Amino acid sequence: MLTGRHWRAWLGWLMLVVFVVVAVTSLDWTRVLQEAAAAHYGWLTLAVLANACILVLAAATWLLFLPKGGRVSPAKVFSIVAVMSTASNGGPLLAGHAAGIHLLSTRAGLGPAGATSVMILDQIAEGLAKWTLVVLAAVLVPGFEYRGAGLTIMVGAPALALGCAVLARREHVLEQFADRWRGWRGAVLRLVADTVHRLDAIRRPGRFSAGVGLSILQKVAEGLGIAAVALAL
């Protein structure tokens, strides 16, 4: 007899089949075949490899950001990153982040606080990677103009990293504050305190810097993949 878990698995596969059928039937196959015949498969291969590198680098970043005592295999982290990437590309805004936190919490066994801490560190590292690219563009590209997003990254990414670093070293203050409250407010504050307690990587400059470096490489791989697709078509 099928259990609830089995029913969810079958339902997931059924939804996947429906989405694939809808996607396939909505394509203009005449144009698809024409574009495929004219495409440069060397560049397409490079684009596929670049996108695969993004997933590998993201998984490596998460392994660096696991909280102390977190034991998760690289293969499991990679599978979670792959699912998160799929949800991010095909789902609504923040669906990928929500899926990543849920899977880190349940499948990886990190719990809500541990999973959220990994996602926070990942987003900080990504912000600093974008900050690095904006700075490089400002230095190397003649006539580079700061847009609203660029200014937000320039100011926000370092400020967020600094704020989390300070909180991570003052975690006892949050714990004391959470102990003063009861009910749902106390539960929320304890979750925040537990999450900050698990920001281990940001207390270790070498490990956190390595994570930022991997995030920068992710951005390089993204740019390479986009350029390869453009050249292929």
Image (cartoon, rainbow, N blue to C red):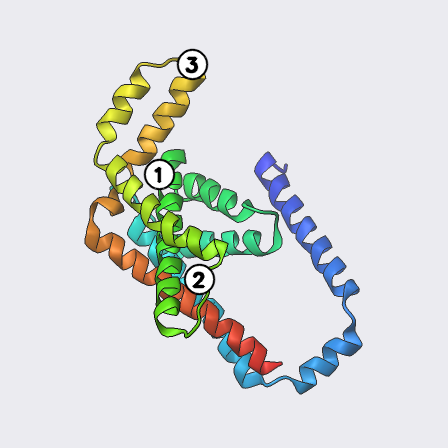
Q: In which quarter of the image is residue 68?
A: top left
The numbered mark, 3 or 1, whose residue comes first in the sequence reads 1
Tell me the crowding category of disc 1: few under 14, some 14 to 19, or many 20 or more residues within 10 angstroms, Cα based.
Answer: many
Q: Circle 2 is placed at which residue position? A: 55
Amino acid carrying mark 2 in the image: Leu
Q: Earlier in the sequence, mark 3 or mark 2?
A: 2
User: Within 10 angstroms of label 2, few (less than 14), some, or many (20 or more) residues?
Assistant: many
Q: Nearer the viewer, residue 113 or 21?
A: 113
Identify the residue position indicated by label 3 in the image.
183
On the image, the x and y values in percent for residue 29 come to: 77, 74
Residue at figure coordinates x 32%, y 53% from the top left: 63
Above or below — where is 24 with respect to 67? below
Task: Answer yes or no: is residue 182 visible.
Answer: yes
What is the secondary structure assignment of the residue under circle 3? helix
Q: Mark 1 or mark 2: which comes first in sequence?
A: 2
Give the residue at x 48% y 40%: 102
The residues tagged by marks 3 and 2 sit, at their Cα atoms, a distance apart of 40 Å
Helix, strand or loop at label 1? It is helix
88 left or right, relative to 175: right
- Going by the image, does 229 lie left or right of 201? right
Image coordinates for residue 61, horizontal then vertical, percent: 34, 56
As drawn, 121 above or below 212: above
Tell me if mark 3 has few (under 14), some (14-19) or many (20+) residues whose alpha carbon lies within 10 angstroms of its own: few
- Mark 3 or 2, closer to the camera: 3
- Which quarter of the figure has residue 115? top left
Residue depicted at 38% across the width and 48% down the height: 156
> At numbered mark 2, what does the secondary structure look like: helix, strand or loop?
helix
Percent from the top left, x then y, of residue 95?
56, 45
Q: Is residue 4 above or below residue 20?
A: above
Disc 3/disc 1 C-alpha distance (Å): 22 Å
